[in-house]
């Protein structure tokens, strides 16, 4: 995406644990986007989501919830379903960490529904794992067992599909290599016959 160069740099700082530089670089990204001739709301939403993740890494959960709420507000403005799902997931994780389990369950359930409808099953499973952690903290072992079964079933399906795709890709690669060898052989024969 054009215009997200500060964001990528800030992500690098955050991953390296240099949160002071990450924060100032995220702020530079926001300033860059807000002063652009045409405001890109999606990019602004993405930036607030990344800031929220940084605050989760720092254990600044209240601040993370604020950033994810900004992401959600911006995503709602443009009706951006993937960003909305990410924001709900982040808000849910933030509430889980401050032990507001009712809100955590509420937002994580919304995230699961949206991620599932988008077909993002990997993140859907991550949202279910967060829900499982909430239920484990509440001592609801039956809910944890049900979530575990659901995660195992979905990840099993994903693994099956990935293996099927790998097999098809290998078959196509083999067929393409054989076709290339046949074409090279034909071209060589044609050249010698001319």
Image (cartoon, rainbow, N blue to C red):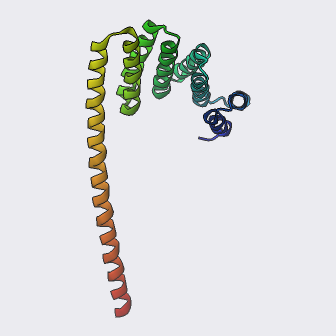
- Residue at image position (41%, 27%) is 126
**Could one spot residue 50 in this view of the protein?**
yes
Residue 149, picture quadrant: top left
Which quadrant: the C terminus? Answer: bottom left
Image x and y of residue 132, in percent: 37, 18
Closer to us: 120 or 64: 64
Rendered position, 105 above or below 55: above
Image x and y of residue 57, in percent: 58, 25
Closer to us: 10 or 15: 15
- Residue at image position (26%, 36%) is 157
Image x and y of residue 48, in percent: 61, 24
Residue 10, picture quadrant: top right
Rendered position, 40 above or below 56: below
In the picture as drawn, the residue positioned furthest to the bottom comes out as 193
Which quadrant: the N terminus? Answer: top right
Count of all numbered marks drawn on residues in the image: 0
**Could one spot residue 194 in this view of the protein?**
no
């Amino acid at each position: 995406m054009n215009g997200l160069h500060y964001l990528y740099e800030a992500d690098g700082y955050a991953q390296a644990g240099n949160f002071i530089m990450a924060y100032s670089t995220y702020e530079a990204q926001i300033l860059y986007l807000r002063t652009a001739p045409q405001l890109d709301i999606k990019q602004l939403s993405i930036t607030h989501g990344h800031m929220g993740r940084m605050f989760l890494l720092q254990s600044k959960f209240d601040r993370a919830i604020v950033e994810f709420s900004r992401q959600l507000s911006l995503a709602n403005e443009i009706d951006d379903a993937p960003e909305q799902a990410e924001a709900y997931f982040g808000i849910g994780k933030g509430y889980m960490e401050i032990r507001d389990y009712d809100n955590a369950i509420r937002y994580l359930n919304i995230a699961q529904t949206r991620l599932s409808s988008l077909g993002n099953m990997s993140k859907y499973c991550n949202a279910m794992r967060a829900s499982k952690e909430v239920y484990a903290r509440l001592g609801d072992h039956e809910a944890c067992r049900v979530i575990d079964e659901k995660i195992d079933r979905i990840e099993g399906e994903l693994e099956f599909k990935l293996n099927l795709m790998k097999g098809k890709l290998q078959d196509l690669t083999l067929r393409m290599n054989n076709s290339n060898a046949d074409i090279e052989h034909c071209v060589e024969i044609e050249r010698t016959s001319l």
